[in-house]
Structure formats: structure tokens, C-alpha cells
Amino acid sequence: MPTILLAEDDAALRAGLEFDLWEEGYRILSAGNGRDAVMFLEQAVDLALLDVNLPGMDGFTLCMEIKKEKNILVIFLTCRDLEEDELRGFDCGADDYVTKPFPCCF
């Protein structure tokens, strides 16, 4: 079963994404902050969905940690919609950058 690391500080959005992804057959490792998300990197992860605005460690730093340690696809799901933020996301190794709000149906 493919595993997704979900790092999102908004508990309601995180719960909705967890449910939708679980319904589609994914195993979800869920974290409300960057530091907790790093601990999940000891497990096999196929994809990381990251918010930029994470407490403890922002998504940009988390993305760099992920890319330094593993070859995992990273997609930012964030409200930070400035072009400079998007470019920074790609500079840290993100594979895609999606701004909120986005449709939550898979």
C-alpha cells in the first residue's frame, strides 16, 4: 500500500485529506508540525504533501530535509501563493506546488 506523509497544521483540513486519501487506499502518516513529520522519515514514504506554514519547522526546511535523506516526491499544498514562495518551493526540491484552496475530492 503506498504511503503518504501529510504535514498540515490545520487540523480540519488534515483530517479531511487523511480521510479522502485513506478512502483511495493510501496509508497516511499525519503530522501537525514539521518536527513530527521528520520523525516519520524513518518509515517508507512514497509521497510527502507539505504545508509551508508549519510550526516547529517550516515546509521549505522540511522539504530540504526530505530531499537530503530520501528520494521522495514532494508536493506543497499551501496558501502561500506568491511567485517567490512557489519558486522557493521548487528551489528546495519540490516536485509540485499547489495553492489553497484546492478541490478535496480524489
Image (cartoon, rainbow, N blue to C red):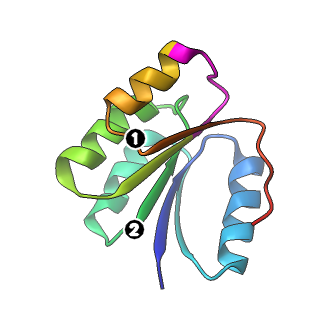
Residue 57: x %, y % from top left = 40, 32
Vertical placement of residue 30 versus 81, above or below: below
Q: How many marks?
A: 2
Secondary structure found at label 2? loop
Residue at numbered disc 2: 46
Q: Is residue 64 visible?
A: yes
The residue positioned 36% from the left and 39% from the top of the image is: 62
Q: Looking at this view, is 45 or 82 the one in front?
A: 82
Residue 18: x %, y % from top left = 67, 65
| Pointer 2 or 1: first along the chain | 2
Residue type, label 1: Ala
> Label for residue 10?
none
Residue 27 sits inside the magenta stretch: no
Q: Looking at this view, is 93 or 53 the one in front?
A: 93
Residue type, label 2: Asp
Relative to 27, is 36 on the left or the right?
Answer: left
Residue at numbered disc 1: 94
Vertical placement of residue 51 versus 5, above or below: above
Q: Is residue 57 visible?
A: no
Residue 81 sits inside the magenta stretch: yes
The residue positioned 34% from the left and 31% from the top of the image is: 61
Vertical placement of residue 93 versus 30, above or below: above
Distance (Cα) linking label 2 and label 1: 14 Å
Secondary structure found at label 1? loop
Residue 75: x %, y % from top left = 50, 47
Residue 95: x %, y % from top left = 42, 45
